[in-house]
Image: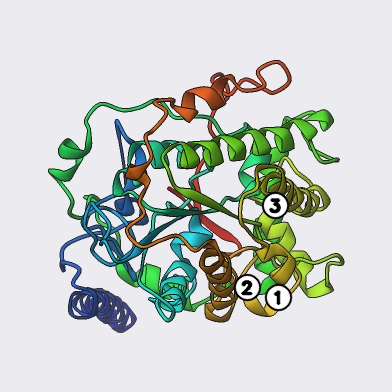
Amino acid sequence: MLLLRRSTWLVLLGVVGVVAAEAMSRVDDAVRLGIPVLASPSHNDLTIQDSLGTRGRPFARYEKWKLNREGFRSQEITLRPRRECVRVAVMGASETFGYAESPGKEYPAQLADSLNRTGCYEVINAAIVGLPTTGQIQLWENWVSRFEPSVVVIYVSPVFYLSNDPPRFAAPKRGGADASRASTSTRSTHFEPRLLARLHDHLHYPNFIQRRRVMKTIAQALAGKGDDWVYRSIPDDRLALFRSHLDSLVESVRARGAVPVLVTHAMRFGDSIRGEDQDLLRAWRQFTPRATEEVLVGFERQAAGVVREAAREREVPLADVANLMSGHAKWFVDFVHFNDDGAAIVAGSIARTVESIRVPSGSVGSTAQPSGKSYTAIAKKKRSGDLPSINSAQSAPLRIVATHTRSDQQ
């Protein structure tokens, strides 16, 4: 009987301790981040999907990430650029939006700091986590172009083209910008304990457990698939599709009077894979299990070459970040996301390229008459004879990487 009483008291004390810790986590978030105590925020709160496509939710906030009234991770801006400044839009996925960097140290923010040392620039971080090039074309045409940037920096992620199915253009949803603005607060309604999230961020499984989890994830993805389903060599059709979509985005930017700047995609891995990086490379594969580790790295290298080729053939300014950074593990926190120092290298390279363009102040996209063409539609038809059908392909899940062995569905 005495043992039962003691056990009961221990359980009660444990429950009280957990509840108190959860309450303190919520109070701390309210004080530091302004998150309502009763809210259950999620990274999904950062985006909306409507007739304009996928874009940032106005005034959204999740942990350290905060968006402005237009849904950009930037300072507040007006619809029209300031007459004395050059407006620069930066488009990309999580590497551009910012992941592991300290607040204000993601490369678009550091790009703004670098550029404003030599002139007046407004930099818009228009990136969306998990958004492939097809989504960025729609985002540019339907939303970002309205803000009339003079320069558009394009940092696309090749790995989306190794997903089970190729990237496709999403069908528009009902409800435009005005409808989506009606509700801009935290969208998650089901209860999620914040204490667990904090513990997950600070406590990590031993390497052998993480390794087993990754292998299990890959094995489950391969179950029931034939050997020919796995990419054991670089798929030429996916590389061609990557180039096709990149060309469409470049042409769409130019059609609206802006100057595109292409940026090659950097990764942690170099020509030879170090032993300590083997687990990390395998962890990267769990997001694209159809490609072997060798194909994953090889595709990244060839995609960087495709970007260089596109820049040369179309006479587009190029920031060759891959040449500067790939293989330098000290600038990455995982396979492709930067630390503060790595983001500074990216920002510096892009800043030098943008400064070389010499766009006059007050020169905005609206000064050129749009062609009226939708490059979303053009891209859907482009090279239809030798590329997989974009319309019939199913889109791969969009993910935000939380650690090198964990993902969350966006």
User: Is 328 on the left-hand or right-hand side of 407?
Assistant: right
Question: Residue drawn at (83%, 72%), measured in percent from left and top?
Answer: 274
**How dense is the environment of label 2, judged by Cα within 10 Å: few (below 14), some, or many (20 and up)?**
many
Question: Residue drawn at (72%, 30%), measured in percent from left and top?
Answer: 224
| Farthest residue, direction left | 182
Judging by the rendered image, the residue that carries numbered circle 3 is 285
Spot occupied by residue 332 in the image (x, y as percentages of width and height) = 63, 73
Spot occupied by residue 171 in the image (x, y as percentages of width and height) = 40, 25
Judging by the rendered image, the residue that carries numbered circle 2 is 332
| Farthest residue, direction top | 385
Foreground tag (3 vs 1): 1
Image position of 183 with respect to 226: above or below: below
Image position of 118 with respect to 175: above or below: below
**How dense is the environment of label 1, judged by Cα within 10 Å: few (below 14), some, or many (20 and up)?**
some
Tell me if label 1 and label 2 are in contact, CB under 8 Å.
yes
Instruction: Measure the alpha-carbon separation of dots 3 and 1.
Output: 18 Å
Viewer-nearest residue: 43 or 212: 43
Residue type beneath disc 1:
Ala
SS of the residue under disc 1? helix
Foreground tag (2 vs 3): 2
Viewer-nearest residue: 184 or 153: 153
- Which one is earlier in the sequence, the residue at label 2 or at label 3? 3
| Farthest residue, direction front | 360
Question: Residue drawn at (78%, 74%), measured in percent from left and top?
Answer: 276
User: Is 226 on the left-hand or right-hand side of 267?
Assistant: right
